[in-house]
Image: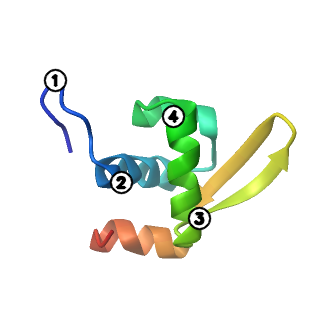
Amino acid sequence: MGNEKGQRRTYREIRERLLYSLALGQQTIRSLSQSAGVNWDTTRNHLIYLMGKEWARQVLALPYVRIYEITEKGRNCINLQKY
């Protein structure tokens, strides 16, 4: 899942990294963005996609923090690598 230096990662690679990070446990957007190596806005946009596919869900929403977790569908997606 690595690109040569200077190449942009694909959406698939970013989403895969986010799902693998969520598989380790519940996380905030900030911690996910750090583990995926992308900025906060990019992480948020990919989380919207992942939630639309029902691969991730928001478990806590406060004014300054949101926590997400992977769903069973998301775990199956990682195992089958079909996204």
Look at 52% across and 68% down and name the residue there. 55
Above or below — where is 58 with respect to 31? Answer: below
On the image, numbered disc 4 is attached to which residue?
33
Q: Which mark is residue 51?
A: 3
Instruction: For marks 2 and 1, give the one nearer the viewer.
Output: 1
Q: CA distance from mark 3 to mark 2?
A: 14 Å
Q: Is residue 56 left or right of residue 35?
A: right
Q: Is residue 1 left or right of residue 11?
A: left
Q: Residues within 10 Å of mark 1 (few under 14, many from 20)?
A: few
Q: Position of residue 48 (x, y in %)?
A: 59, 57
**Front one among 20 and 61:** 61
- Residue type at mark 1 is Lys
Look at 57% across and 69% down and name the residue there. 52
Mark earlier in primary sequence (1, 3):
1
Q: Are marks 2 and 1 in contact (CB under 8 Å)?
A: no
Q: CA distance from mark 2 to mark 4?
A: 13 Å
Q: CA distance from mark 3 to mark 4?
A: 16 Å
Above or below — where is 53 with respect to 60? Answer: below
**Front one among 2 and 75:** 2
Q: Which mark is residue 19?
A: none
- Residue type at mark 4 is Ser
Mark earlier in primary sequence (3, 4):
4
Mark earlier in primary sequence (1, 4):
1
Instruction: For marks 3 and 2, give the one nearer the viewer.
Output: 3
Q: Which mark is residue 16?
A: 2
The single residue placed furthest to the left in the displayed view is: 4
- Residue type at mark 2 is Glu
Mark earlier in primary sequence (2, 1):
1
Q: Which quarter of the figure has residue 37?
A: top left
On the image, numbered disc 1 is attached to which residue?
5
Which quadrant: the N terminus? top left
